[in-house]
Image: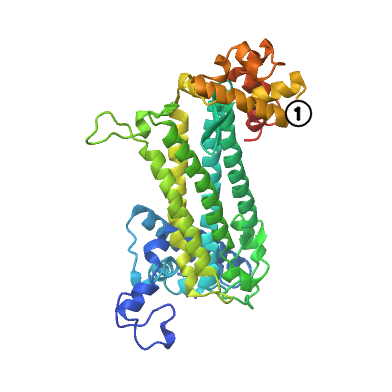
Amino acid sequence: MADGTDQKSSNQMWGGRFASGPSAIMEEINASIGFDKKLYAQDIRGSMAHATMLASKGIISPDDKDKIIEGLNTILSEIEAGTFEFSRKLEDIHMNIEARLATLIGTAAGRLHTARSRNDQVALDFRLWVKEELQKTEGMLTALIAAFLDRAEENADTVMPGFTHLQTAQPVTFGHHCMAYVEMFGRDRARVRHAIEHLDESPIGAAALAGTGYPIDRHMTAKALGFREPTRNSIDTVSDRDFALEFLSIASICATHLSRLAEEIVIWSTPQFGFIRLSDAFSTGSSIMPQKKNPDAAELVRAKTGRINGSLVALLTVMKGLPLAYSKDMQEDKEQVFDAAESLELAIAAMTGMIRDLEVRKDRMRAAAGSGYSTATDLADWLVREAGLPFRDAHHVTGNAVALAEKKGCDLADLSLEELQAIHPDITKGVFDVLSVEASVASRTSFGGTAPSEVKKQIAWWRGRN
Ligand code: ARG
């Protein structure tokens, strides 16, 4: 049947050698229209460029080309208006659109598929989609980086404990900690930009796998579709899904960064830490415990990482061991990418909102920074610098001071000069200048260090790079 809805008839697009239609199960496992309808705009754009090229090379008539373009425009508005009827019997977006085109314009529709196969068609549509998604991701990462740069600027002097093993290590500034995330998301954005460059080649015209004998102009279609150039090997073109794998790898690394940030937000917003308060807009209450404010958005960002990493592993596993060129296995590429893209967009948007809104509790950070002997390294460095001790000996002397403070239940800065001198006679009252967390932070002026002066330089560098 012309609309492909008759169960018994063979497929109108490829059914020439088939006596009957597919079984219901065959139809179900074969159909991708349920998810690849997302590619409608790319499919129509690709077909318009292809038809225009065919006409300009004299492969189809200008009249047929005009009919095709007009019909495709009608289909585009039908899909956008929600009036287009998608049919599972027509398998996928490519055949749904072509069948509708036949209904609209008659025989001219059959000329659109000259010098083209669904193999290069789907490679084109999907590449265009991934390219647009990467461009969107790039913009979203820029917004997240901007949110962090603002928080870093406001908090270049805000002292907090720095951790290793989640144990207090040395005082740092919250601005410096924010800038660590700027570096991470900046690398993600660089990976996105690189991936856009990488996939910027047009697949259309590779046909089924061997190219075509028609005098097509692949440079023309590449240019019309905004690609740098056409792909160089027709076999690779229809069997390659590196662009999807690259998207998923980048998404997984980015989601991993987001999950680390999410975890820190969860920890920092506990009453025990109390370093930050999340805005009401990005937290929820408990249905039973009225006092609670839960960091659900952060927890869900942390969890989305599981889905995104899962998609990467799924597609790697689909592609592993596939012989060249196209195999239907590759139809499984789209859902993984669509799902990961949706999750990543949500996660970046939620994180950007949380970072923009969060309240920094400087008093709590300052108090925590001063506890846990966080300036012990500063004492050791002072002994090296002012008393000429080798670092290893200074480390040992400092260990004794920490043990004494621990025994007395006080901080290093609360020990008296006499007590310190009993541990090492060369200690003078000048040592108290380095035992404060502010002095400790201000002294870390090495390139990339936590001193406010250095953090401000790094903020300025990033501001110049957006
Ligand atoms: N729906 C298919 C996919 O997503 C389109 C390509 C089908 N090609 C073919 N030779 N059966 O991969």
Which quadrant: the C terminus?
A: top right
Task: Judge whether residue 408 can be spotted in this image.
Answer: yes
Task: Judge whether residue 108 can be spotted in this image.
Answer: no
Return the residue found at the far front.
422
Residue 2 picture location, percent across and down: 35, 76
Residues 248 and 44: in front is 248
Q: Is mark 1 within 8 Å of ligand 1?
A: no
For disc 1, the marked residue is 390
Residue found at x 65% / y 73%: 215
Return the residue found at the far left.
288
Left or right of 260, for residue 85: left
Residue 184 picture location, percent across and down: 58, 41
Left or right of 242, for residue 277: left
Residue 422 picture location, percent across and down: 64, 16
Residues 290 and 333: in front is 290
Q: How many marks?
A: 1
Mark 1, other Cα within 10 Å: few <14 / some 14–19 / many ≥20: few
Q: Is residue 162 above or below residue 387?
A: below
Q: Is residue 316 above or below residue 384?
A: below
Which quadrant: the N terminus?
A: bottom left
Identity of the amino acid at label 1? Answer: Pro
Residues 434 and 420: in front is 420
Q: How is the image coloured?
A: rainbow
Residue 146 picture location, percent across and down: 55, 32
Q: Is residue 324 above or below residue 96?
A: below
Q: Would you identify the image quadrant in which residue 284 lies?
A: top left
Q: Is residue 288 above or below residue 65?
A: above
- Describe the element under mark 1 as helix, strand or loop: loop
Residue found at x 45% / y 40%: 263
